[in-house]
Amino acid sequence: MPASVVIPAYNEAGNIGRLVEETLAAIPEDMLGEIIVVDDCSADATQDEVAALMGKISKLRFLRHDRQSGQSAALRSGTLAATCPVIATMDGDGQNDPGDLVKMLEQLAQGKSDGVKMISGVRTSRKATGSRRLASRFANWIRNQVLQDNCPDSGCGIRVCERDALVRLPYFTSMHRFLPALFLAHGHKVGYIPVNDRPRLAGVSNYSNFGRAMIGLYDLFGVAWLLRRTGNPGVSENMAEQRDAKTGTRR
């Protein structure tokens, strides 16, 4: 089943072109439907870097926001524009390894019959600074205490999921940080797989530890409120099956 690879990017000149080329080389042709770079109104040469590849890579598409709207908005723009039934997403800074997407796509296909709708990465051998790793571990701990989603690495940006399930989720700013919890709340199973973590080769991170923590705490309690009000009853249409369920009879 081919996938649309959606890559949100903001000021990722020096990273985004290399990542697009790596993605094309890493994913077999029959598994890769398209690569969609969504530029969140970058102020650097991100757009020029992608434009230089447009004539060489037929599967490459480029979207650009007219104002900076955040990573979740970029992910949503790319997902809505995607033409494939599976969405694969990576951060635009090149720290995710596109080679991991192959095994993630395979695992998603294998788990489909069991109700698995998302495979999310768990970073091993983190290349971030010690303070960032500590902040990430604390964020994962407090998030799990509130949401109880048992997600081992909510900050990992490399994921694959069914497009139909993703577009049905309620959209809000920073939802990309809570996708496993949202999938679970809507009755879908989520699988996890170890993935590579690489150092950033160009540019600087768009998030500070403090800024990420403040946004994360604000959103966390909003998501907890939302999940408590999310109900997903089973739905059946066949009247005979409904009668059998009431009487306990079997056909």
Image (cartoon, helix red, strand yellow):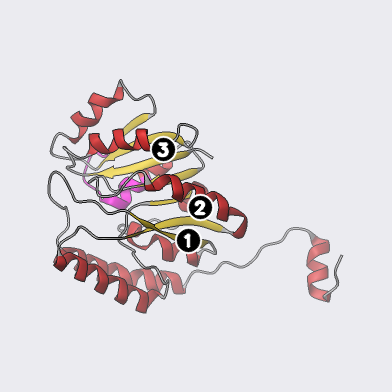
Is 72 inside the magenta-drawn segment? yes
Which kind of residue does numbered mark 1 sit on? Gly
Question: Element at badge 2?
Answer: helix
Location of mark 2 (residue): 107
Q: Position of residue 142 (x, y in %)?
A: 30, 76
Q: Is residue 73 visible?
A: yes
Tag 2–tag 1 contact (CB < 8 Å):
yes
Q: Position of residue 240 (x, y in %)?
A: 83, 62
Which of the 4 quarters of the picture holds residue 119? bottom left
Q: From the viewer's perspective, tell me whether residue 211 is left or right of residue 152.
A: left
Question: Element at badge 1?
Answer: strand
Of callouts 1 and 3, which one flags the residue occurring earlier in the amino acid sequence?
3
Please state, as top left, top right, bottom left or bottom right, where the N terminus lies in the image: top right
Which kind of residue does numbered mark 2 sit on? Gln
Reply above or below: 215 against 1.
Answer: below
- Is disc 3 surrounded by few (<14), some (14 to 19) or many (20+) residues within 10 Å? some
Q: Position of residue 125 (x, y in %)?
A: 26, 60
Q: Is residue 63 visible?
A: no
Camera-nearest residue between 139 and 104? 104
Which kind of residue does numbered mark 3 sit on? Ile
Tag 3–tag 2 contact (CB < 8 Å):
no
Of callouts 3 and 2, which one flags the residue occurring earlier in the amino acid sequence?
3
Reply above or below: 33 against 109.
Answer: above
Which of the 4 quarters of the picture holds residue 34? top left
* Residues rendered magenta in the picture: 63-76
Q: From the viewer's perspective, tell me whether residue 129 is left or right of residue 105.
A: left
Point out which mark residue 27 bears: 3
Location of mark 1 (residue): 191
The Cα atoms of the two marked residues, 1 and 3, are separated by 20 Å
Residue at the far front: name it: 125
